[in-house]
Image (spheres, helix red, strand yellow):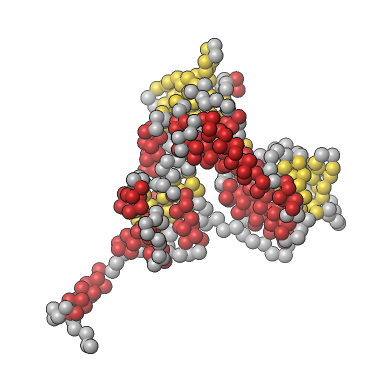
Amino acid sequence: MPPGVVGKKWRRPRRFDRNLIVIGAGSAGLVAAYLAASLRARVTLIEAARMGGDCLNTGCVPSKTLIHAARAGENHAQALARVRAAIAAIAPHDSVERYEALGVEVRHGAARLLDPWHVAIAGETLSARAIVIAAGAAPLIPPIPGLAEAPYVTSETLWDLEDLPKRLVILGGGPIGCELAEAFARLGAAVSLVELADRVLNREDEEVSALLSSALARRGVVVLTGHRALAVTRQGGDFTLGVVGKDGGRALPFDRLLVAVGRQPRVTGYGLEEIGVALGAAGTIATDPWLRTNFRHILACGDVAGPWQFTHMAGYQGGYAALNALFGGLWRLRPDTRAVPAVTFTTPEIARVGLNEREARARGIGCEVTRYAFADLDRAIIEDETEGFVKILTPPGKDRILGATIVGTAAGELISEITLAMRHGLGLKKLLATIHPYPTRSEALRAAAGLWRKNHAAPGLLALLARFHAGRRGAGYFVPKA
């Protein structure tokens, strides 16, 4: 979408109080504000809720802490205490004090765009040459009859529960739903997972979804794929979610219902509509490849711009948004999104970067698949954690990496090497030539590269080598001169 020009309705000021205003102090906004301040720009960061945004307070930090505590065998009270301790320990990294020490002016309150250059907050009007919108996203609440009157929670309000629900129904089989289903099952809740699609994690390959469904079932989670939520009913103090699938309907009683069907960008309530910032088909703020909106000096990054909803992508975009906001008109930088990793922190862990087989088929991209099972890896055998595999996609006959899926222990750590290789154009031959320490899980990547090399050995060359070595033994085929 090419950025438009500022309409005649608005008159651009001759002077500005600031170089940059950043709306939202989550991952994207924090990086944008920090980078701008480090470049000696005058920047104001505005946050309506808590510093650190969703990731610190209700997203990545608490959820991964809960998963860790559940795997360690802690009970719900212990896990909740660990969650709060982790947030408290990490919060100083994102605090007002730290960012003010870095040179960022931090304002707390609800921001509102008055025009393309002016932002109102707490009765004051601030002006800036450029604005970065990093307002994030919020849980999507589906219009299910009876839901509003039910004891439901989201990924944001879940952390207020002091007691473990005995019966937990989770609506949504994406990464959030699957991670929390496993965690609460380990904590002792009776968990039912309801997913409208015919499989969980439907963006992954079919075998990945099947493997995770089996893993969840082994931990006691009732996985209901291909089921649609109909309504919540109440009888006395008891609540039930009615669902229907191809085999008919059923009723799922619950003490708590966790809604995890997705997140929607925060694009209302702070003036976007009034000044005419354009939205895209997905409801996110529409941006060009340089993160500019239809106003060239207003940029958007993170969940509010999409299409990714990952903390690491929000931070990555935030840096580019700040640079393009500060130096727009002189030069600009385009984020490289060819290799974006994603991790689902279940057991087994699931990590992916680039294409998977499902996407390659859908896009008509021919590829070869090299697969290495952790059952053959020494470190996995030593630790008795052999479930999973490494799967790498390459163009036919070439070692260039199109994408990879890793399923197994520490998959999220291993995917970074593949991401680095893709980002810098390193093929499987380079991975094979790289020394990996023994015994580690990283050897699985080198082993996969070795399998690719073995599968692409030239038959003619191998035959010639056989004759050469036979001659060296005096077999009469070929004897080189001394």
State the image quarter where residue 139 is shown.
Answer: top right
Q: Position of residue 91 (x, y in %)?
A: 65, 44
- Residue 6 in view in this figure: no
Q: Position of residue 381 (x, y in %)?
A: 32, 49
Please tell me how many numbered marks the rendered image carries.
0
Left or right: 234 with respect to 119?
left
Name the residue at the top extreme.
236
Q: Position of residue 132 (x, y in %)?
A: 71, 50
Nearer to the camera, 186 or 475: 186
Query: What residue appears at the point 84 percent right and 45 percent down from the top-left corner?
Result: 125
Name the residue at the bottom extreme.
482
- Residue 170 in view in this figure: yes
Q: Position of residue 1 (x, y in %)?
A: 64, 52
Nearer to the camera, 256 or 78: 78
Query: What residue appears at the point 51 percent right and 24 percent down from the top-left corner?
Result: 165
Q: Quadrant of the C terminus?
A: bottom left
Query: What residue appears at the point 66 percent right and 52 percent down from the top-left corner?
Result: 31
* Up-down relation of residue 378 to residue 138 (above or below): below
Name the residue at the left extreme.
475
Query: What residue appears at the point 39 percent right and 27 percent down from the top-left corner?
Result: 246
State the image quarter where residue 266 is shown.
Answer: top right
* Up-down relation of residue 405 to residue 323 (above or below): above
Name the residue at the right extreme.
14
